Amino acid sequence: MSELSVKGMQKEVDEYISQFKEGYFSPLAMTARLTEELGELAREINHYYGEKKKKSSEGEKAIDEELGDLLFVLTCLANSLDIDMEKSFQMVMTKFNTRDKDRWTRIDAQEEKS
């Protein structure tokens, strides 16, 4: 399986959605779907790492699958609003690398060698 760029993901999702007459849902509907998918991810994380274990009647789902669902809906939202997610990511990384550059305790070279 080859590596997929963010642009490649956006293109693949667009090709998938474009084959249906309904097209993309409205931004508001997709925001609701993002909330739903985030809740499903939170539930799985709680089952694996939290105190709330699964009931025996609950089906098996994986955190990676829930992350994939969330990424798909997020990509749909970006596509429907004509947003380049790579540019969005670069903007936020610039922000973190400038505004927050001294916010966290850095690992210095000595600690890395030990």
Image (cartoon, grey):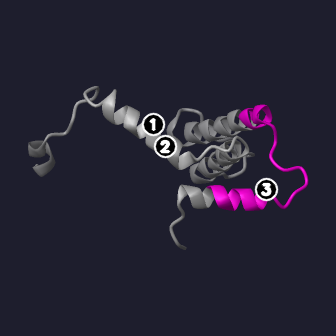
Toward the left, the furthest residue is 110
Toward the bottom, the furthest residue is 1
The three-letter amino acid code for the residue at tag 2 is: Phe
- For residue 6, say whether it is visible: yes
- Whether the residues at callouts 3 and 2 have beta carbons within 8 Å, the answer is no
The three-letter amino acid code for the residue at tag 3 is: Ile
Residue 14, magenta (yes or no): yes
Q: Position of residue 94 (x, y in %)?
A: 38, 37
Q: CA distance from mark 2 to mark 1?
A: 5 Å
Determine whether, in the image, residue 106 is placed left or right of residue 49. left
Check residue 92 in the rendering and tell me which mark sits there, or answer none: 1
Which residue matches tag 3? 17
Q: Position of residue 90 (x, y in %)?
A: 45, 43
User: What residue is rendered at 63% in x and 48% in y?
Assistant: 66
Disc 3 crowd rating (10 Å Cα; few below 14, some 14-19, many 20+) is some
User: What residue is rendered at 66% in x and 43% in y?
Assistant: 78
- Whether the residues at callouts 2 and 1 have beta carbons within 8 Å, the answer is yes
Q: Position of residue 106 (x, y in %)?
A: 21, 35
> Which residues fall within the magenta stretch?
10-32
User: What residue is rendered at 27% in x and 29% in y?
Assistant: 104
Disc 1 crowd rating (10 Å Cα; few below 14, some 14-19, many 20+) is few
